[in-house]
Amino acid sequence: MKKQKPDNLKGFNPFNQLPQEIIFTILDLLNSNPLDIKSFSLACKSFYAAESKHRTSLKPLRQEHLPSILSRYPNIAHLHLTRCSRVSDTCLSFVSHACASSLRSIDLSRTHLFSASGLLGLALNCNNLVEIDLSNATELKDSAMAAVSQAKNLEKLWLARCKSVTDLGVGCVAVGCRKLKSICLKWCLGIGDLGVGLLAVKCNHICYLDLSYLPITSKCLSPILKLQHLEDLVLEGCFGIDDDSLAVLKHGCNSLKSLDVSTCQNISHNGLSSLVSGAVGLQQLTLAHGSPVTSSLADSLKKFSMLQSVKLDGCLISYDGLKTIGNWCASLRELSLSKCSGVTDEGLSSIVTRHKDLRKLDITCCRKITDVSISRITNSCNSLTSLRMESCTLVSREAFVLIGQRCHLLEELDLTDNEIDDKGLKYISRCSQLSNLKLGICLNITDEGLIHIGRGCSKLLELDLYRSVEITDSGIIAIAQGCPGLEMINIAYCKDITDHSLLSLSKCSRLKTLESRGCSMITSLGLTAVAVGCKELTKLDVKKCPNIDDAGMLPLAHFSQNLRQINLSHSSVTDIGLLSLAGISCLQNITILHLKSLTPTGLAAVLLACGGLTKVKLQAEFKWLLPHRLIEHLEARGCTFQWRDKVLQVELDPKCWKLRLEDLMP
Amino acid sequence: MDLKERVCGELQKEVPKGASFTNFNTQHQQKWEDPSSTSDYSTRIEPPFQAFNQTSQTQSLLLCNNQIKVPMQDGSVNDLLQASKIQDWDPSAMLNNLSFLGQKIHQLQDLVYLIIGRKGQVLGRPDELLVQQQQLVTADLTSIIVQLISTAGSLLPSVKQTLSAATTSLGQCGEYGGVVFPSSAQGLNDGVQPQNAGGSKVSEPPNSVDITSNNGNEQSNHIIEEHELKDEEDAEEGENLLPGTYEILQLEKEEILAPHTHFCTICGKGFKRDANLRMHMRGHGDEYKTPGALAKPTKESSSEPTIIKRYSCPYAGCKRNKDHKKFQPLKTILCVKNHYKRTHCDKSYICSRCNTKKFSVIADLKTHEKHCGKDKWLCSCGTTFSRKDKLFGHITLFQGHTPAIPSDEIKAAPAGTSDGATNKVGSVNFNLSSYVSSESEVQSSSMDIKGGIDDAVGYFSPLSFDTCNFGGFHEFPRPTFDDSESSFAFLLSSSCNYSQKSGEE
């Protein structure tokens, strides 16, 4: 009896008792980290099988592996092929047979090589397909659209930059895919009024329509505005639409919630009011880079009580315009005035004192505002979650204390190129919800302030310290200890930073992006620590780090299996170090300029060995040194080359660099 | 901008620019009589494409000679020219024309030989004879060139029209305008001619009709009237005349179908139109030449109240028959004729271009033939449209109809995948393991590029000849797909005539 018991226990697997639903729920919770899922599936056969059944979304790196992956995962509903630079028709036909009715969405943006016949297979075999993204397929023609139109259940179609598609192609889609809800035709320069008009007539369910930069006129607008369910309309850069033709339209679209008419210089307040007339539920309006915002334009939007978000980036704004916005009946949640000339303390004050509910405010490059505005903003808008105020150079260092004192809910704060100092940082560290902090080119901040941030802002995910030259190791160590969830850090050109910082950053296991350009003190030792500690590292920039050499590449290749992008320009890495990187199967984007000991043969071997490369930046001289056939072969494999021939520039002193920048400014 | 459009644009611009006609002639002569160049081409030409290549050759020679090169302008896209695909031309008619031209050239050659021969004997004679001879040769050459242009023009239907404008505007050869175009039209309308024959002079080819109508004499009024009336049959639907307020006339079937209604009382010759009869009468004596006799007989009915005349179709059961319950009268005799032929007669006129469309009224055929082949906007239901907006209007109206993608693109797409893409991928997969084998892949891709170039050459046949002189590329088999900016780029880089790149957008 005693002997049998352990035998029973041995054969007994508690997970066998669990119903599949519970295992799936567990897996759902694991989904945040791909490495966890991987370890789960490698635990035992039953887990492997469970994980195979559970997974519905795939983002493969190479099309060659698709057959084996798809046979492992039978329930794939979402297939992202964006990382495969080439997807052939054969591959698509395999997908269409393997996934068949389970496939619901496929993303083919940024991939090439496939054609109409591959799409036809998908459309015919995958009858549950509702989403297709074909953006950037510049070579696709109308025949491909005819193939897409066979997908009768399609609800979402993205065709951005499909330049060869004409009205005929979009006409086929309009007739074939009657259930379309969202469609993006941005940059499809071959499509005009006829195609868009037909689309609006045939597909009554459209609720999202992106017509940016199309050569359309107002002729197609009247059927569009008759669409019953249209909520989102993007007309960015439609230069053919002007006030006169808009005036003919009798009424706007009632269901419209979001309208984007940025860069439409020919639409002034008259045209705008005829576009939005009747759209009582309008919530979001983007007028960026359009006609000047005057009081009459602001007046025409006065009565929209549901309006929540207004973007006026790059517009010329008058004081009257700002004042009128302040008198709107709606209470704005989001306001963007970035690069608006004409924003003054008075104008901004009149807005923020009325719109107290403001959550997001963007006043990037509003160079005329001073402490007065900051005081008003912080006084009235206490619930701000995002404040972007890059290059507000007249704002003095005392004003930042107010931000820290009054806006505790801030999650995103962009203080790039400002006068903030350690005292300001001390107060800003009170914003405990802060997740994204940009302190680039803040020359007045030192480790002292950063230590405060490290203590107070434990939820920090992104930190930008680009060219904040006073920062040294102790500040970074404080951040690394205080913010364990850090995902992105930029310490470029903080020249005093050494390996100690990297050693401490290696404790941030979620770190995905590390940019340490021009940190001449860091060595391969520090990089090794990061490689070992930060398993999720995907982007690494160690340009102009002369002490980084092959010794750093070997551990990187061994531990950082998720690395996708690397910049090794001006480092001391040689052929051997580069060749070892071939072990990283994810590696797609590599920049290797000015590597002294790089030889053509070594480079050829590297390029051949890194099978997944899609983008390589190289010195132009290698174009002639590498065999022409090799380059052709690599290009056929889906790799694009960017040849650079820039002369090395001597690095300037950071402070003098900023002075020069200010000289350049008007 | 599409290369093809641009090339066509150049063609169009080049031809009218040959305004200095004499200059044109001499150059042409020199080139034409250079036997080496012609034979060189003809030996290379493959038999099945002989006729085709000849035309392109002649045309290219012609364009070559015209040295007034128009610099590339970012020209307006000419819609007409887009349609100028060399699909709908009659090779046999072309061959006839060309051989006829060949004979003429040979005759001229003999003449020039004769002149040269004589020149030796008649040294010292006054130059008068020489001048006369020169004029003779020039006149002959001009006629050859004009006919050549018209022949080439018939190849590109849209160019034909611009040429007609060009040639007539050139005062020097304005007289040929009337001569040349009917001949080219005859070449095209070969199949129609037997039926036309019955109509003798009256049923002239359409172009000459247009020319006469341009002259603005009285006859043209009638012709215009006829065209208007033809359409009126449909427009009349809305007319609401109360029954009894008009007189109903009914012509018999034989009367309707009689070819002529106006007969000369002297010689008995029949005419369709009274105006033509009056013109004819002038030949029978001076009394018919008076303005009074030639003028349109004025209606004297203005004094008494006119009874409105309406016509009934003799076909029993027809809606246009007076016994029909919802009788709708026809307005004029011409309406009756056209209605009867359209509705109750066989459609005996077949379009010689498409060989599918049939008509019972010859005017309908002519209208159709003017546009036949130009209807490039096709619906899935088979209906063709000459304009894109008409097609889209049609699709908007009918459920389930879709725009049909031009067949050349559909052909191109599957070919591209089966030949180019999949092969390439296959070899790429193979190549991942070994570097050596990448050679095969590279080769295949380079072949693809060549194919693309060859295609471009073939596609723009008449012009690529003279602009870039590819020559050797024609030895490659015809390609399977067109596309690729790269092939265009290659084409352009090797041809120095283009200053701009067309690949970029």
Image: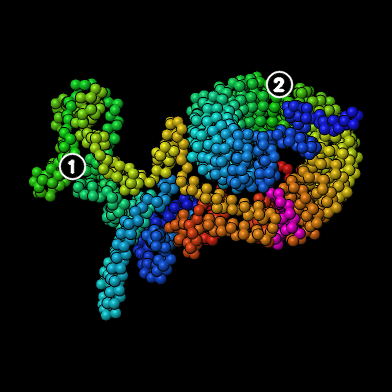
Q: Position of residue A580 (x, y in %)?
A: 79, 53
Whole-Å distance between the Cαs marked 1 and 2? 88 Å
Q: Position of residue B284 (x, y in %)?
A: 10, 49
Q: Does dot 2 land on a helix, a strand or a loop? A: helix
Q: Give the mark toward the camera: 1 or 2.
A: 1
Instruction: Give the residue drawn at x 45%, y 61%.
Output: B466
Residue A169 appears in the rendering: yes
Pick the front one: B138 or B200: B200
Q: Position of residue B198 (x, y in %)?
A: 19, 47
Pick the front one: A203 or A465: A203
For label 2, count other residues whose C-alpha is less than 10 Å away and answer few (under 14), some (14-19) or many (20+).
many
Which residue is farthest front?
A1
**In the displayed structure, does residue A61 sit left or right of residue A177?**
right
Q: Position of residue A93 (x, y in %)?
A: 59, 43
Q: Amino acid at mark 1?
A: Pro
User: What residue did someone put label 1 on?
Assistant: B259
Pick the front one: B360 or A382: B360
Pick the front one: B413 or A227: B413
Residue range highlighted in magenta: A602-626
User: What residue did someone put label 2 on?
Assistant: A354
Instruction: Give the residue drawn at x 52%, y 61%.
Output: B496
Residue B290 appears in the rendering: no
Instruction: Give the residue drawn at x 82%, y 45%.
Output: A559
Residue A585 in the magenta stretch? The answer is: no
**Residue B129 drawn above or below residue B497:** below
For label 1, count other residues whose C-alpha is less than 10 Å away and answer few (under 14), some (14-19) or many (20+).
few
Q: Which chain letter matches label 2? A: A
Label placed on residue B368? none
**Pointers 1 and 2 in contact (C-beta within 8 Å):** no
Residue A615 in the magenta stretch? The answer is: yes
